[in-house]
Image (cartoon, rainbow, N blue to C red):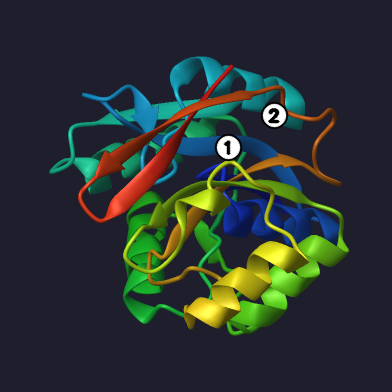
Amino acid sequence: MKFVMSYSCGKDSTLALHKMVEAGHVPVCLLVMVNQKEHRSYFHGADLALLKKYEAALGLPMLLCQSEGPDYHTVFEKGLEEAKSLGAEAAAFGDIDLEDHREWGEERCRRSSLAPMYPLWQRGRESCVEELLRLGYRCVIKSIRNTLLPESLLGRYLDAEALQVMERAGIDLCGENGEYHTLAVDGPVFQAPLEFRTGGILRFGEHSVVHTFS
């Protein structure tokens, strides 16, 4: 089945893309929601230049859907309609077990007459992280909740050592409660490694973010 991937540039949506391809489905494009004010992807903060590099590294056209926030759901639906014009019959999501997230995605698909697909659903949070690393994906830790995790993790690759730090901190290793976010930069679904650089650390209350740019 041809599908559009709801893509955040993070580890879960990248693993979901991998599982869809592994199952024989064909991606036609990536749908990325962009904060219209900040000119960066929502939640993972990839800027427009870096998103262009993602498009090249993954070898898939990227639909950049600009939203101010309140119109997020309607802009997403417009993106799904555009994906349909490219041949998409389904939309895939990287959610693992959060019911309200799944309900949101299913409603967007219902309104767009696309089949919703959740390749990671109920696979287990920790097992998803383990599989990601076993498959050889490289993911940079982009942001952390600094009340739970040390800033020394920022800009590092997610690996066994980083997971040990997270385990000692007692957080969910998949970061499903917003403890940390990543940017996937290489792995089996990438045609070439993503070229990127990291800069200084930005702090927003209890969240710390490493600046990433192309």
Q: CA distance from mark 2 to mark 1?
A: 7 Å
Question: In the rendered view, would you say 143 is above or below 97?
Answer: above
| Residue 106 x %, y % | 40, 66
Residue holding disc 2: 60
Q: Residues within 10 Å of mark 2 (few under 14, many from 20)?
A: some
Q: Crowdedness of circle 1 by 10 Å Cα count: few (<14), some, many (20+)?
A: many
Relative side of 62 to 17, left or right: left
Give the camera-side residue of 168 and 96: 168
Residue located at (84% from left, 28% from top): 192
Is 206 drawn above or below residue 31 in the view shown?
Answer: below
203 and 111: which is toward the camera: 203
The residue pinned by badge 1 equals: 30
* Amino acid type indicated by mark 2: Leu
- Label 1 sits on a secondary structure element that is strand
Q: Secondary structure at mark 2?
A: loop
Q: Quadrant of the C terminus?
A: top right
The amino acid beneath tag 1 is Leu
Residue 23 seen by the camera: no
Contact (Cβ within 8 Å) of mark 2 with mark 1: yes
Residue at 60% over, 59% down: 12
Does residue 159 appear anywhere in the picture?
yes
Return the residue nearer the eye: 35 or 200: 200
**Mark 2 or mark 1, earlier in chain:** 1
Counting from the top left corner in percent of width and height, residue 209 is at 40, 41
**Residue 162 image point, x, y percent:** 66, 63
